[in-house]
Amino acid sequence: MSVLFRVVRSGMTRRRTQTLVITLATLLAVTASVLAGALLVASRAPFDHAFARQRGAQLTARFDARRATTAQVAASARASGVTGSSGPFPTTTATTAAHLGTLSIVGRADPGGAVDRLTVAQGRWARRTGEIVLAVDPEGPPVRLGQRLDFPGLPGGPTLTVVGTARSVSRTADAWVVPAQIAGLTRSGRADGYQMLYRFAHAATDAQVTRDRAALAATVPKGAFSGARSWLSVRLFATRETALYVPFLVAFGVLGLVMSALVVGNVVAGSVGTGLRRIGVLKAVGCTPGEVVRAYVAQALVPAAIGTGLGLVAGHLLAAPLLADTSAVYGSVGLGVSAGVDLAVVGGVLGVVAGTAWLGAWRAGRLRTVDALAVGRTPVTGRGRGAARLAARLPVPRPVGLGLARPFHRPARAASMVAAVVFGTAAVTFATGMAASLGEVVTAKNHNAADVTVSAERPGGPGPVPPGTTRATAAEAAAVRAAIAARPGTRDQYGSVTAEAQVAGVTGSVPVIAYDGDASWGGFVMVSGRWVRAAGEAVVASPFLTASGTEVGDTVTLAVNGSPVRTRIVGEVFDVGQQGLRVFTDLATLRTADPDLHPTDHSVRLTRGTDVAAYVKHLNAVLKPLGVSATDTKSVNGSDGAVALDTLAAMLTLILTAVAGLGVLGGVVLDTHERIRDLGIHKALGMTPRQTVTLVIASVVLPGLAGGALGVPLGLAVHRVVMPAMGDSAGLRLPDVVLDVYRAPELLLLALSGTALAILGALLPAGWAARVRTATALRTE
């Protein structure tokens, strides 16, 4: 057995507490680092990774079944530039009686293929007629396996059973059935069209995709090519959504990595520093400075390696559910902790441990033997005496005064405790504010302040009428409005109708929501400007302003039914519906282009104290003959991302708080071991175990208060930077109500949480100090 091995084993055996602290510190540090690294990697181009893994369709083409045969459509796969294809798949569009509305349905025998390999998220793939697989839609209503979907508008009223859900990175359909089922979902008894999925040699730009599209159209009869969707438009939408989460992940990732390095470095440095006298003994018995350095580096690396191994296991276990939430948010599949993250974390943490231990041991090894022996037992003259004298004059019990003065004896160690508390408090502050901000975002985006909504009884259930479908006459709209006004309990109401328009600079149609009445109370949160007050005015969201190159105060022309409608933008509203491209205006504005446009939906606000259920029941009795119905169910869409972020934030905050508490615990353990003889003297003079606990806890009160006072502003600053960055990443400007979520009482509690965190970290060493015997304390190094 070598001398080095005996020294390492002896050191670890004698200093079990510090060995345990190093193990725990590295365990939590590696766990936090694995989570942070995995999330950072997952946030890097998640759509591109998923698209490549699933061989997404670079062009999803539609063909008219009346103008081309299956063979002619299949022959398009031989067009110039095509490197892969799937199809042709028969397609149709059908409306369900459920709240899923109108579905784009594709007949597909299996989820695999050369292009657009679907991933079954729940259940299984459809195997026979009568079964349907729905596309995963985080923004849509919940779907359960076994649910039956009725199609009452089709011959025979077919009913399909939901047997699974699937995810298409190319977003090629709303649902899939076996090919033989398509005929039963059409009025004609045959497919309405065919879908082909392509990959090309060159499709990285809009110009290249346009050329590829033209090449495909040339291979089929004229008029057969009815449309196509580029992967670039899908990518733009997906990256706009996922970019929202990147600043959040970066913020928590950086906090986790910084805290891990800080805590591990301080614990290891302190462990080496408290062993100066033993280093002196080793030198006295003949160990060289190099042997001393190697021994102390090994004493730190062995428990650190154990903690690293356990931390990797814990990190992977915790990362699995978090990455599952992240996968749902990103619309991706198969996210996991990469080997690169593991290697980087292991190398980084062990590098910090080795470097810190080497530096401390190297400095101690250079000391003369007599100096090492003296430093190990003799405190620095004068350090902390002023603070001790001041604490003695305070009107507090003597143990409290002694504890308050302790941090000034070791200011560097006290600073490390403060730093740990600062980052822990900052993480709690940021997570608290982010959760509140996300709650405000969900509230603001839904525009559902109405107590009751009235809509036509149509397939797909309540909700905005798709343009070009159901239209209300003037008499029908007036009758509904009068019935609502006559009902006791009605406070306010407004009607709404959806139309479509074209706007210069904006690709495709733009939904225009026109209101008959004052809709300003309907849950619309303004970012700037004001709500619509008169005809010819409109409010839009940030993405519309960006796409159209306009600003609040500019005039924009809407082409409605081919007629130009000039509107002045008077405000910027927070809205994410239809990618933030909707226009909100007064109904009188659109009637210049469509005089027969009348409200199809109505929103009602009730007087305080009205029984909502009774109101809806009696109102429906009046509305039934009119073909409309009322409901008090509020539409809450798009909250899955907020829930996922809240889950991520809660888990990461818990881990970072544990790391911060361990940083305090490590500092208190080192301080208690270093001053154990002083503690023995206090016990010999009559200090009770309860007073000992009070002394140790009081020693972390000032670092806790300082850390809390500094951590709250840091957390506020991170929140103030990250939340607007999240909005900018999604092309949105956030309103003040989303950013100004902190209140004075909450800030005070958050600041005091730093002290609570420090006290929790000090409880274990305080209990150990209270239990140690006086004679043992006087003998201990």
Image (tube, grey):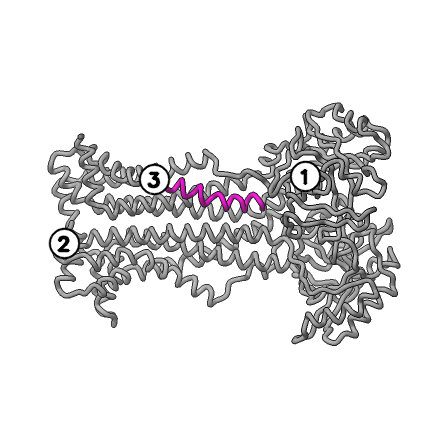
Q: Nearer the viewer, mark 3 or mark 2?
A: 2
Q: Nearer the viewer, mark 1 or mark 3?
A: 1
What residue type is disc 3 on? Answer: Val
Left or right for 203, reference 121? right
Residue 557 appears in the figure: no
Residue to which mark 1 is pinned: 126
User: Pointer 3: residues within 10 angstroms few (<14), some, or many (20+)?
Assistant: some
Residue 433 on image: x %, y %: 51, 58
Earlier in the chain: of badge 3 and badge 2, it is 3
Left or right for 303, reference 240? left
Q: Nearer the viewer, mark 2 or mark 1?
A: 1
Nearer to me, 263 or 768? 768
Residue to which mark 3 is pinned: 352
Earlier in the chain: of badge 2 and badge 1, it is 1
- Report the magenta stretch's main SS: helix
State which region is magenta.
304-329
What residue type is disc 2 on? Answer: Thr
Q: State whether residue 311 is above or below residue 202.
A: below
Residue 102 on image: x %, y %: 75, 48
What residue type is disc 1 on? Answer: Ala
**Spatial separation of the CA atoms under disc 3 and disc 2:** 34 Å
Tag 3, which secondary structure?
A: helix
Figure disc tally = 3
Residue to which mark 2 is pinned: 776
Q: State whether residue 685 is above or below residue 8.
A: below
Residue at position x 73%, y 68% in the image: 604
